[in-house]
Amino acid sequence: MTRFMSHLLTACIGFIGIAGCGAPENPPEPVAAPEMTKAMPEKIEVEILNVSEEFANINTSITREELAEKGIVENSWITVTYKDKSYPMLMGKDYGDVARGKWIARIDEEDNRLQLAISFGNAANDMGCTVGDKLLLQLSEAPSLENATTQPAG
């Protein structure tokens, strides 16, 4: 009889152990992985220090070094926003880097600061800005080919 009770007890313990091994009654809800989003480039506020008389080029308060710290270097693209309008432009070396009538951002050699211009145009007149106004700069993607402001060299 003790042998019978021993087998019965072993069977009961085994059954209880197996019964407890199933899936939990209320499984936890799956959690979605966080979306990988591309960080938006920082917007940089600059002031218009002066406007050149002859071509109305816009001379700003930010230096080459400050731009480089933000990742804005020669041959990169920036978007300049004034009021409700945005102006994509190449960060070039000189006016010949863009087609006639197109925007260019460049470093003015005299004061080492960012200058915004239109090749053979009047930047401040076109933008409608004046000395003391604030502009927002942002590193951006090159525009699509049909909207590009540069022409191929050659």
Image (spheres, rainbow, N blue to C red):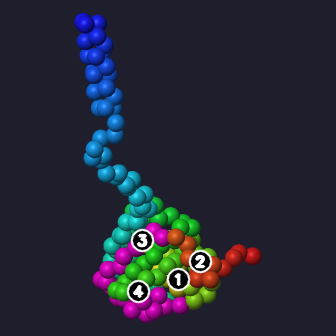
Three-letter code, disc 4: Lys
> Does residue 98 show up magenta in the picture?
no
Helix or strand or loop: what does disc 2 sit on? loop
- The magenta-colored residue range is 121-140
In the visual, does 41 lie left or right of 11?
A: right
Three-letter code, disc 1: Trp
Residue underneath mark 4: 85
Of residues 151 and 114, the one nearer the viewer is 151
| Rendered location of residue 16, percent (x, y) | 28, 27
Q: Are marks 2 and 1 in contact (CB under 8 Å)?
A: no
State how far apart marks 3 and 1 are (Cα): 15 Å
Q: Image quadrant of residue 36? A: bottom left
| Rendered location of residue 151, percent (x, y) | 66, 79
> Does residue 130 show up magenta in the picture?
yes
Helix or strand or loop: what does disc 1 sit on? strand
State how far apart marks 2 and 1 are (Cα): 15 Å
Q: Are marks 4 and 3 in contact (CB under 8 Å)?
A: no
Which of the two discs, 3 and 2, sits closer to the camera? 2
- The single residue placed furthest to the top in the displayed view is 2
Q: Are marks 1 and 4 in contact (CB under 8 Å)?
A: no
Where 130 sits versus 153, above or below? below
Residue underneath mark 2: 144
Residue 44 can be seen, yes or no: yes
Residue underneath mark 1: 103
Residue underneath mark 3: 138
**At 42% from the left edge and 89% from the top edge, which residue is drawn?**
127
